[in-house]
Amino acid sequence: MITIRNLTFKYRTKDMFDNVDMDIEKGKITSIIGPNGSGKSTLVKILVGLYRYNGKIEINDIPLLKDNRKDIRKIIGVVFTNPDNQFVAETVMDDIAFTLENMNYKKQIIRKKIEEISKYLGIYDILECNPHDLNSNQKQLVSLASALVHDPKILILDEALTMLDPYDKEKILNILKELNSKGLTILNITHDIEDTLISDKIYVLDKGKIVLSGTKEEVYKEEDKLHNLGFELPFMVELSNRLMFYDLIDHVIYDMEEMVDILWK
């Protein structure tokens, strides 16, 4: 879905990327993690056409060039860290509608799409509220609705789960997994390794270079490399490793409910 080849990018005098290659597979959840300053958010800005770059990027087989950025943005939805920075209207309904209005959807279709996405995400009853007056979970759900309302092929999360408490984060992660099961490609960019548990593939960035990549199983086995970058293993992986040491389970378990079911038996 996204092919990156020989990506090189310099911000002012700092080299942010140096001949980076990356593949974001269609219908998969790919996570990119790395320390602060590793280039994660810069990559998002490149992918949505805000920064010019050297190299080759194709998104859904469309080359990412200056003259086709609008076409690219039609197939991408983006949710950022702070939803307050994304709100442009005085009501949730108008904020979600903004995306569709910019794409020249008819009013009847706009109303239908807003109703569908707001009911799916459980925010139908707050459509008349000012988005700035909502709690952090509601705000992020509104941002997610705005990113999904035009049925994008790719959803990019730029540290989008950072401000949520564990309960609300779990709720949104479950929504993301369900959307992915319906075919949505998700690129999850984060500095929190716990957020990578839903991933099919993980890239680890450091100083603008990929230092580790593979399936989550492959990446989590590189505990020393992760530790050197400031990452501990996700809690469920660490717990699984300890339980396997005592022969209580025979494989790594990523889901807490599955863990409880197995141990209970």
Image (spheres, rainbow, N blue to C red):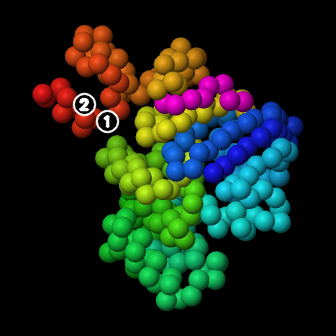
Which residue is found at the position 73% from the left and 33% from the top?
A: 208
Does residue 135 appear to the left or right of 247 in the view shown?
Answer: right
Amino acid beneath label 1: Asp
Whether the magenta-drawn stretch holds residue 113 is answered as no
Q: Residue under circle 2? A: 259
Q: Residue 28 at x, y = what percent?
A: 52, 46
Looking at the image, residue 129 lies above or below residue 82 = below
Residue nearer the viewer, 263 or 84: 263
Quadrant where the C terminus is found in the figure: top left
Q: Residue 157 at x, y = what percent?
A: 54, 51
| Quarter residue 198 falls in | top left
Is disc 2 surrounded by few (<14), some (14 to 19) or many (20+) residues within 10 Å?
some
Query: In this figure, what is the number of numbered marks?
Result: 2
Regarding residue 180, the answer to whether it shows in the image is yes
Looking at the image, residue 5 lies above or below residue 254 = below
Which residue is found at the position 49% from the left and 89% from the top?
A: 108
Q: Residue 102 at x, y = what percent?
A: 64, 78
Looking at the image, residue 190 lies above or below residue 60 = above
The secondary element bearing badge 2 is classed as: helix
Which residue is found at the position 39% from the left and 62% from the top?
A: 138
- Asked whether the beta carbons under mark 1 and mark 2 sit within 8 Å of each other, the answer is yes
Amino acid beneath label 2: Met
Does residue 181 appear to the left or right of 226 in the view shown?
Answer: left
Query: How far separated are the C-alphas under marks 1 and 2?
Result: 6 Å
Q: Residue 87 at x, y = what percent?
A: 55, 68
Regarding residue 123, the answer to whether it shows in the image is no
User: Which residue reaches farthest left?
Assistant: 265
> Which mark, by number, is residue 255?
1
Report the magenta stretch's main SS. Answer: strand
Looking at the image, residue 112 lies above or below residue 44 = below
